[in-house]
Image (cartoon, rainbow, N blue to C red):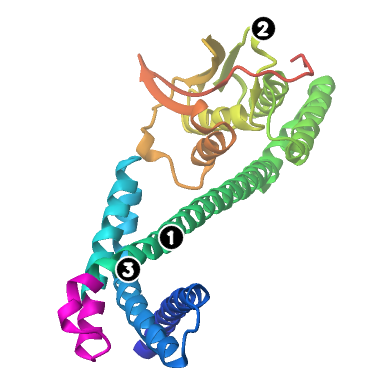
Amino acid sequence: MINRLTEPTRRSALQTIVVVLCINASSALAVVVLNWLMTEGMTSAQFTRGLTTSLVYANCCGSIMAIVMPRVAPVYAHLKFPISWVCYIGTVLVLSVIGCLISVLLLTGIGILHSADYWTIFRSSLVVAIVISMVIGISRYCYEGVKYRLEVTTRRLQLKELEEERSRKLAVEARLSSLESRIHPHFLFNTLNSISSLIQEDPSLAERLVERLATLLRFSLDSDQTSVVPLSRELKVVIDYLEIERARFGDKLRYSNDVPVELVTVDVPPLSIQTLVENSVRHAVAARRDGGDIRIRAIAKGDRVSVEVSDDGPGFSADAIKTGHGLDNLQARLAVLFDDRASLELSSDKGWTTVSISVPRTTTAEVARV
């Protein structure tokens, strides 16, 4: 198991060493060829000596650069310009001096250079070493900078695609959850039982309930066509839902709708207000013998609109919101659709619990009526 984990690391290290050696050899060969072109009558012995000298310089300077620069370059990248470049170039100069000192020492030790000329040779070779190190070092730094920016851009695009996919998944889950709650056997049984009992007593009301149920189910199925809908259309579905539930609960369910006409074109996620109302019906009306009151209203607040659903039920805290359920899914959908321009808020005041969504004051081209 350990060998399998370390094998990719070993392969990567080996590839890095091969690349460094190839760059060092290319640099050495380039210097020798340039010297050969500028020197007339160079013998094979001189060429061999020059190639050996260049290889020693290239490997000493290049190897030091390959060890040190990858570790200090990321640190310099976080510094402001031009401090980052000053630090980078300064490090290249220092490493070039160290590489030349080691190279001349090695060449003197193996007898290619005379020890008496150590400092003279060091000064003359330092200029060439610095120029080559600067060209390779700065080119590599620019290359790594461009590569890093491309990787960051790629990661951002991938995250954006993931967010969009998550948004689509949340929308599908919300639609399925909403549809499931409506076609749940208990819901259908209660609704159909209410309709059945009204057929003889109040045929007109029974017919209206059938129409409202059909409209509600149709909206649940068709809401995948768009990510937002006008508030007016959402409120129509909410009223249909409340009227169906009121046929079941009777006077136990009391509600009011206070949404100004000028705000009915504001865009909201489909089934968002319905989720808030359904939450109130479940906790404030169905759970209590005397039922409860539900208030729906919309308020303009600058460039945003707050749509509030309040009830006089027992209330709940934000910690009670279950992950992956209605309010949590709605909060995630708001974040995906509007980023930080939308929010879901929970508050309690004087026996009333209010859950509200705040969305940008954008409107659709089509103006629908409740």
Q: Regarding mark 2 in the picture, which secondary structure is present there?
A: helix
Depth order, front residue of 283/355: 355
Classify 246 as above or below 105: above
Q: Residue at x 71, y 42 (%)?
A: 188
Q: Tell me residue 239's x, y (percent).
A: 68, 22
Q: CA distance from mark 3 to mark 2?
A: 68 Å
Q: Position of residue 98 (x, y in %)?
A: 22, 69
Tag 1 residue:
135
| Side (left or right) of 370 relative to 313 | right
Relative to 283, 56 lies left or right: left
Disc 3 secondary structure class: helix
Residue stretch in magenta: 102-121
Where's residue 212, x and y in %?
Answer: 77, 28
Task: Identify the residue position indicated by label 2 in the image.
Answer: 262
Residue 108 falls within the magenta-colored stretch: yes
Q: Position of residue 37 (x, y in %)?
A: 53, 75
